[in-house]
Amino acid sequence: MLFNSYQFIFLFLPLVLTGFFLLSKRNSVYPIAWLVIASLFFYGWWNPAYLLLIIASMVINYALGRILSEERKYTLIIRKGTLIAGIALNLSALAYYKYAGFFVDNINALITTDFNLKQIILPLAISFFSFQQIAYLVDAYRGITREYRFLHYALFVTFFPQLIAGPIVHHKEMLPQFLRPTSFRRNIGNLSIGITIFSIGLFKKTVLADSVAQYASPVFDAASGGETLSFFVAWGGALAYTMQLYFDFSGYSDMAIGGARMFGIKLPLNFHSPYKATTIVEFWRRWHMTLSRFLRDYLYIPLGGNKCGLIRRYLNLLLTMLLGGLWHGAGWTFVVWGGLHGLYLIVNHAWNGTKRYLGIGRSGDSRYGKALAWAVTFLAVVVGWVFFRASDFTSAIRMLEGMAGVNGVEIPNAILSRAGKWGIWLQEQGVRSYLGGGSVFVMTYLWIGGLMVVALFLPNTQQFMARYQPALVLYSHDESSRYAITPKVPLSWRPTTGWALAVAAISTCGVLALTSVSEFLYFQF
């Protein structure tokens, strides 16, 4: 069941909310049990057979966590062995369902064998609930968290607003909220905040992301089919996908946070205007923030982090991002994407170190310095997205060749012929024309330009709702603080009739755009 579906919006969510608040009048056990049952139903809607997988995973990890948290009852050796076994078990399930076919195909290609696996259907959300439970086991071993009731643990794993595509939450973030009595009281404030955030997310997904997708997919499909792409066509496809992924993931994150807030629960912020970043380090502090935190805390730091010398630090960064890329998908394009971002981070840290060594000041803080830094960062991100989206390595190279101008520059004849002297000058410079496609060309770049303005200059949902603390903030940004402390900021939400009508209009547009339900891009991970 998708957030952007009629079944979820008009049936599932209202029924779950109604049952939750009715049961909360009795005690805290009934509403928690109700949410667990509803969340399992939500998960099983996709494929009931995999309910056994997630339930078995919860039972086993809960039992292992109990052992890990009993420092007095079990020796360090037993607890350490339990932790290793638990991590191995979670990773084994993930490896089988997500990567077995990928590894077998590469072995066949490498040593010319003909091993064949039956088709393995990837269980929904296995990457997210596996990482979430690995974090729980490590935290239990470290004594950071402890679980006493299976029902609470089951809700921590299955809570439907964050089950399918995150955010990846920590047990210590969620359990105190589940145990807080005020969480189970009907709160008009939480409902209005949650509905507002959910509506914004729905609009981002159905109106913005799905609309610009029609200008991205044909270009990548053409590259996959072996067509050569000219400069503006390739860039149009790459930038359209860049915007599609931004608003798709941002929309999902808003809907997850809004859905949870209706129940009085705050999820961690997972997305904070990443295209405003002026460095790759800052980009990863804004994009998929809970995954960045997981990779840092449970992979990069255990590998040694930055405490084992410069070369080792860079190797740790590269390995972390390579594995982060592989986590996104079983394909070499994802590995290349992760490797690129690993190299980007290495260059970023090396540049910062060089500036400190040479005593270079904060010249980059000037307006032009920031603009240049943003342009370099954004270009690097777009190049990475090409590999992220392309169906294979060859298709990605075709896209990049087009973006580099290898196949020349072409503009629709309908546009070039109306450009007057500029059109003649462009043709003298080698720009070619072609028949047809003028409206697609114009609409592609109008959508890209409009969405770029929204992404770069308008407040994001966290800023828009800043005075009501819509989510748990992982990293603080000065821009968000300004929205929180300034009493009168344009586009700052307040519980008024005017804003209620505006949100109603936004949600109506989002629902009317549900002519064809499309999955969120991160559902495939």
Image (cartoon, helix red, strand yellow):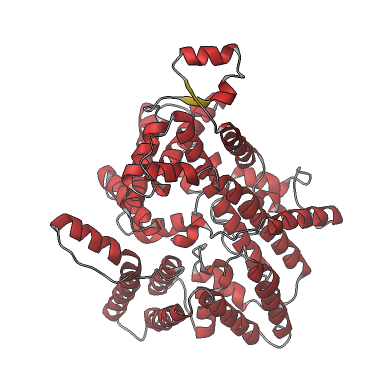
> In terms of image quadrants, where is residue 108?
bottom left
At x 70%, y 85%, the residue is 23
- Residue 283 shown left or right of residue 247 in the figure: left
Number of callouts:
0
**Relative to residue 473, is residue 223 depicted above or below?**
above
Residue 306 appearing in the image: no
The outermost residue toward the right is 497
Q: Nearer the viewer, residue 399 or 100?
A: 399
- Residue at 45% across / 71% down in the picture? 144
Quarter of the image where one finds residue 507: bottom right
**Which quarter shows the C terminus?**
bottom left
Eyeballing the image, is 330 above or below 48? Answer: above
Q: Position of residue 46 (x, y in %)?
A: 51, 73
Q: Is residue 180 left or right of residue 238?
A: right
**Residue 70 is at least partly visible in this image:** yes
Q: Is residue 285 above or below residue 255?
A: above
Where does the image place residue 368, in percent across and percent down from the top left? 54, 24
Q: Is residue 70 left or right of residue 26?
A: left
x 70%, y 81%: residue:
19
The residue that appears at 63% across and 54% down in the rendered structure is 206
Outermost residue to the front:
435
The N terminus - image quarter: bottom right
Residue 280, horizontal then vertical, whole percent: 44, 41
- Give coordinates of residue 67: x percent, y percent: 37, 83
